[in-house]
C-alpha cells in the first residue's frame, strides 16, 4: 500500500537501496494489487481527423485537471507518508535514502520521530564495556569498538557519562590536557570534541560536576549540552549551555540550594529539561532545569518512597523512554514494586505498572540454583538453596513500546553461577509477566557503573 502511493520517480530510485527493495518493487504481484489512476492524457494530432474532434479531447483533459488536488495538498500528503516510511526503516537504509534527492535529504535531516532503544551499553572497569541488545534478531555489534575516540590522547580510559536519543557524551582525562568531552554518534561513527566552558580563570574555585546531552530529534536536528559547574567557595551550582547550531556556550541560571545533596551524575533529559532526583540524603528533593526558559531550577514532586528506608544508589532507576519519565523503587526487601510515571505538567507521579518479584523468581530461581557445583562444597550449596527465593532484581531500563503490551523492563537477576564476575541480563515483559534472557555481562556491574546507557539508532549529524 505504501509503495503504491509513492510517485514513480522516487519509487524507481528506491530500487537502488538494497536487493530486497529491488525484488519487492519488481514483484509482478505489485502491479496486480491496484491499478493507478490516470494523471493526464497524451494527445497525438491526427491530420486525417477533423479539428472538432481534437478540440473535444482538449476540453475533456481540461475537465480532468480541474478535479485534481492542489499542489500544496499533494506535497503535504507525500511528506506525511514519507515520514511514516522513514520511521519504519532501519537506520542504514534510511541513510542511503538521503542520496535519492536533495529534497529527501532535507526531509530526512529534519525533525524525525523519536525511536525506542534497541540496546543498552554496560560499562565495567578499566574501559571495558559491553552492549546487550534488546531484540535477539539484532546480531551486529556496532558500538563495541567505538573507534572514533582512538585519536584522542587517552582513548583507553574514556567513559560514557550520558546518552540521549542516539547520541553519547564521552569523557577522557589525563593530567597534561585535563578533561575532554566528546559527542559521539555510534550509528554513524561520527564524533566531535566539545570546547570546554570558559572557566579556565576560575579553575581553582570552579569544577565541573556534571555534563548532559539534551537532544530531541522530533523537534530539531540540533542538540545541546548542559554543563553544571560547582563553585567551591559558596557551593552554588551554575549552568551553561552548548548549542550544536551555534557551536558556542552561553550562561544559564544558578541553583541556590545546597548542591551536595543532588545526584548530579544521573541527570535525565525529558520534556525540554534536565531532571535530577535526590533520595540518598534528606531532605529528599527533585529539581529540573528547563533549557529553553533559562530560569532558576524548579522543584517537582518526590517519587513515592518509604520514609523509614535508607536508600542506596542501586535501589532505584530513574530514566526516560519514548518521551515518558519513569522512576522505579526496587530494593531487595520488596516482593513487588511499582513503575511510576511523571505527568507532563509535573503535578504528580502515578503508578504505570505493578511488577511482582515472585514472577521473576519463578522464572530464574531454578536457573540460579541448578549450577554444576562440587558435591563437597556444602557451604556454597546451602547458600544457593537459601537464595532460591532471594533472587535480587535490579532495574536498568524501562522501555516503552507503541502499546503497553510492547513495554518491558531490562533487569539484572544475579551472578552467573558461582563466579565472582558476570551478571545475567533479562527482559521482563510487563503485560505477559514473562522473562527472557538477553545476555550475560562479562564483568560484575556491582562494582562498576550503576547505569546502563541507551543505544538508539540515529543518523543525526554531530
Image: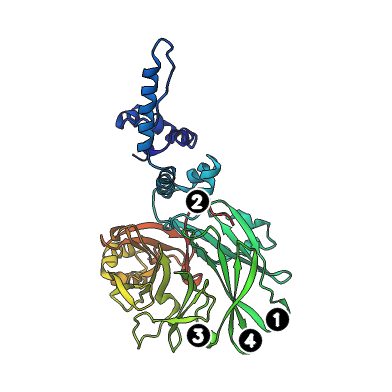
In the depicted structure, whether residue 49 falls above or below residue 251: above
Residue in view at x 53 percent, y 57 percent: 221
Q: Is residue 124 visible?
A: no
Helix or strand or loop: what does disc 1 sit on? helix
In the depicted structure, whether residue 298 falls above or below residue 114: below
Which is nearer the eye, 106 or 40?
40
Crowd rating for badge 2 (residues with CA inside 10 Å; few <14, some 14–19, many 20+): few
Q: Which residue is mark 2?
A: 141
Helix or strand or loop: what does disc 4 sit on? loop
Q: Which residue is mark 1?
A: 202
Which is nearer the eye, 103 or 226?
103
Q: Which residue is mark 4?
A: 232
Of the two numbered discs 2 and 4 in the rendering, the one whose residue sits closer to the viewer: 4
Picture quarter with the N terminus: top left
Q: CA distance from mark 3 to mark 4?
A: 15 Å
Residue in view at x 43 percent, y 69 percent: 319
**N-terminal-most mark, 3 or 4:** 4
Residues marked 1 and 4 touching at CB (< 8 Å): no
Q: Which residue is mark 3?
A: 261
**N-terminal-most mark, 3 or 2:** 2
Of the two numbered discs 1 and 2 in the rendering, the one whose residue sits closer to the viewer: 1
Residues marked 2 and 4 touching at CB (< 8 Å): no
Amino acid at each position: 500500500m505504501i509503495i503504491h502511493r509513492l510517485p514513480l520517480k522516487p519509487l524507481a530510485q528506491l530500487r537502488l537501496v538494497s536487493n530486497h527493495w529491488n525484488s519487492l518493487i519488481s514483484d509482478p504481484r505489485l502491479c496486480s494489487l491496484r491499478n493507478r489512476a490516470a494523471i493526464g492524457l497524451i494527445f497525438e494530432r491526427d491530420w486525417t481527423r477533423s479539428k472538432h474532434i481534437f478540440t473535444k479531447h482538449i476540453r475533456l483533459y481540461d475537465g480532468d485537471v480541474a478535479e485534481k488536488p492542489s499542489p500544496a495538498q499533494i506535497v503535504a500528503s507525500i511528506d506525511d507518508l514519507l515520514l511514516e516510511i522513514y520511521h519504519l526503516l532501519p537506520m542504514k537504509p534510511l541513510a542511503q535514502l538521503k542520496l535519492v534527492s536533495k529534497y529527501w535529504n532535507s526531509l530526512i535531516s529534519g525533525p524525525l520521530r523519536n525511536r525506542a532503544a534497541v540496546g543498552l551499553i554496560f560499562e565495567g572497569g578499566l574501559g571495558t564495556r559491553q552492549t546487550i541488545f534488546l531484540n535477539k534478531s539484532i546480531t551486529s555489534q556496532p558500538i563495541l569498538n567505538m573507534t572514533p575516540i582512538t585519536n584522542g590522547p587517552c582513548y583507553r580510559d574514556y567513559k560514557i557519562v550520558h546518552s540521549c536519543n542516539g547520541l553519547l557524551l564521552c569523557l577522557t582525562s589525563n593530567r597534561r590536557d585535563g578533561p575532554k568531552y566528546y559527542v559521539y554518534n555510534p550509528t554513524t561513527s561520527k564524533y566531535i570534541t566539545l570546547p570546554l566552558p570558559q572557566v579556565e580563570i576560575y579553575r581553582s574555585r570552579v569544577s565541573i560536576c556534571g555534563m548532559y546531552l539534551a537532544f530531541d530529534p522530533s523537534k530539531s536536528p540540533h542538540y545541546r549540552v548542559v554543563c553544571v559547574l560547582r563553585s567551591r567557595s559558596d557551593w552554588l551550582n551554575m549552568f551553561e549551555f552548548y548549542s550544536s547550531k551555534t557551536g558556542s556556550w552561553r550562561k544559564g541560571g544558578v541553583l541556590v540550594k545546597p548542591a551536595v545533596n543532588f545526584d548530579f551524575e544521573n541527570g535525565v533529559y525529558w520534556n525540554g529539561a534536565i531532571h535530577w532526583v535526590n533520595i540518598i540524603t534528606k531532605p529528599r528533593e527533585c529539581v529540573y532545569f528547563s533549557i529553553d526558559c533559562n530560569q532558576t531550577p524548579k522543584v517537582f514532586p518526590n517519587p513515592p518512597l518509604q520514609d523509614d528506608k535508607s536508600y542506596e544508589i542501586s535501589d532505584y532507576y530513574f530514566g526516560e523512554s519514548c518521551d515518558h519519565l519513569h522512576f522505579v523503587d526496587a530494593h531487595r526487601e520488596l516482593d513487588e514494586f511499582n513503575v511510576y510515571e511523571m505527568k507532563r505538567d509535573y503535578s504528580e507521579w502515578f503508578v504505570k505498572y505493578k511488577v511482582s518479584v515472585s514472577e521473576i523468581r519463578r522464572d530464574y530461581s531454578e536457573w540460579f540454583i541448578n549450577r554444576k557445583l562440587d558435591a563437597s562444597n556444602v557451604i556454597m550449596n546451602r547458600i544457593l538453596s537459601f537464595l532460591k527465593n532471594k533472587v535480587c532484581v535490579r532495574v536498568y531500563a524501562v522501555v516503552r513500546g507503541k502499546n503497553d503490551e510492547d513495554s518491558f523492563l531490562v533487569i539484572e537477576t544475579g551472578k552467573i553461577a558461582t563466579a565472582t564476575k558476570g551478571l545475567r541480563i533479562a527482559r521482563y515483559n510487563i503485560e505477559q509477566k514473562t522473562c527472557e534472557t538477553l545476555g550475560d555481562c562479562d564483568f560484575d556491574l556491582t562494582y562498576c557503573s550503576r547505569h546502563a546507557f541507551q543505544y538508539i539508532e540515529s543518523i543525526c549529524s554531530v
